[in-house]
Amino acid sequence: MEKKDIDWGNLGFGYQKTDFRFVSEYKGGKWDDGVLTEDDKIVMSECAGVLQYAQTVFEGLKAYTTEQGDIVTFRPDLNASRLEDSAKRLEMPPFPQDRFVEAVKKTVAANAAYVPPYGSGATLYVRPFMFGKNPVIGVKPADEYEFRIFCTPVGPYFKGGVKPLTICVSDFDRAAPHGTGHIKAGLNYAMSLHAIQTAHRNGFDENMYLDPATRTKVEETGGANFLFVTKDNTIVTPKSDSILPSITRRSLMYVAEHYLGLKVEQREVAFTELKDFAECGLCGTAAVISPVGKVVNHGEEVCFPSGMTEMGPVTKKLYDTLTGIQMGRLEAPEGWICKIQ
C-alpha cells in the first residue's frame, strides 16, 4: 500500500479530508447496515434536531503505525461504550458497540494510505459522531439519526515539543451538578468556547474548572482530565460525577500501577492541595499528557516543582510508557491494541 504524498513531519493538528467515511442511518426504529462513502457532505433539513437542540455526541481516538509496521487503534471498545452512555443521556438510540468497533476498523482500513508512518510523530485522528437529523420544532428527541466516522491525519498536538502550560482557574462552570459533564456531548464543548477564549485573551493556555456546587474541588479542563503526582510519587486524579471518564486517564492509571509500580488514587482533590503536589498534567487523546507548570487563581500562583521547562520525571515515565504501548515498543495489556492490518 502506497502512502499519500504528505509532509508527515510538518502536519498540524487540523482537518484534512481523506478518501472514505462510514455512514449509518437510523430510521423506523433501527440502524441500517451502513456504508463507506467518498461523499463528505451532509444534507439535512434546516429544522434538524441537531441544529435546533444540539442533540449530538461524539468520540475521538487515533490510529497508529507501530514499530512492527502494523496499523492499530487503541482501546476502541471503550470509545464504543462511552458513546453509548452519551447517547442514552441525550435520548438518542445507541449505536451497537460491536458495530462501532467494526466501523472504526473499516474506516481506518479504507484510509490506510493516510495513516502516518512510524516515527513521524503524526497519527490518524478518528472522529465517530452521531446526531439528530429529522425536523424537530417542539423540544423533544429526534426520530431519525445519522452515525458517521471520518478520519484526518494530524501532527503532534504541540508543535516543537511539549512545554509546561500555564492555566487559570475559570470563573465559569463547565457542567452543572447532575448535568451532562460525564458524557461527550457537543453541547459541553460549545459552552466551553467562551471560557477558553477568555483564558487565551488573558494569556493562559487552558482553564481549570472547579466543582460548580462549592468551587473548592478540582474537576477538569474543557477537554482533558487532570493528573497529579505527589511528592512521594503517588498518582492522583480527581473524582467527580461531572468529569468525563477519559480513556487516556484510565489507561495512564493502569500503567502507573501495573507497569511502573506506583500507588494510584482517584479521589476528590481540594484546590488547596495543589501546592502540595510535585507534578501536574492534562491527559487526553490529542496530546496523551500535557504538563502543567503553573496554575493561577486570580493572582494567586501555584507553581509546581517540576518547573516550566519540561515534563516532570514521573509524568515523562507515564507518557513514554503509554506511547510505547500504543506504538508497539512495549507489550500491551490484553485487549488494548486493536489491529487493523
Image: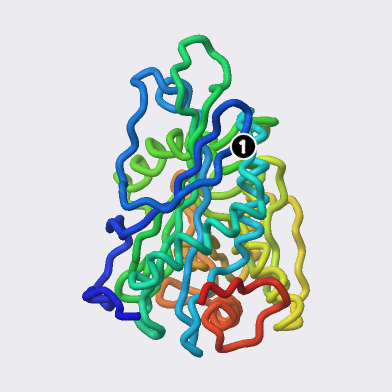
User: Where's residue 318, x and y in %?
Assistant: 60, 77
What residue is rendered at 45% in x and 79% in y? 65
Is the residue 35 above or below the residue 174 in the image? below
Tell me the crowding category of disc 1: few under 14, some 14 to 19, or many 20 or more residues within 10 angstroms, Cα based. Answer: many
Residue 75: x %, y % from top left: 62, 65
At 39% across and 44% down in the image, what residue appears?
196
Can residue 101 be seen here? The reply is yes
Q: Amino acid at mark 1?
A: Ala
Q: Is residue 218 above or below residue 72?
A: above
Q: Which residue is mark 1?
A: 87
The residue located at (50%, 82%) in the rendering is: 70
In-front residue for pair 66/330: 66
Q: Nearer the viewer, residue 13 or 260?
A: 13
Q: As drawn, is 117 to the left or to the right of 85?
A: left
**Residue 339 found in image quarter:** bottom right
Residue placed furthest toward the top: 138
In the foreground, 240 or 6: 6
Residue 272 visible from this viewpoint: no
Residue 140, picture quadrant: top right
Residue at 59% x, 26% y is: 28
Secondary structure under tag 1 reads helix
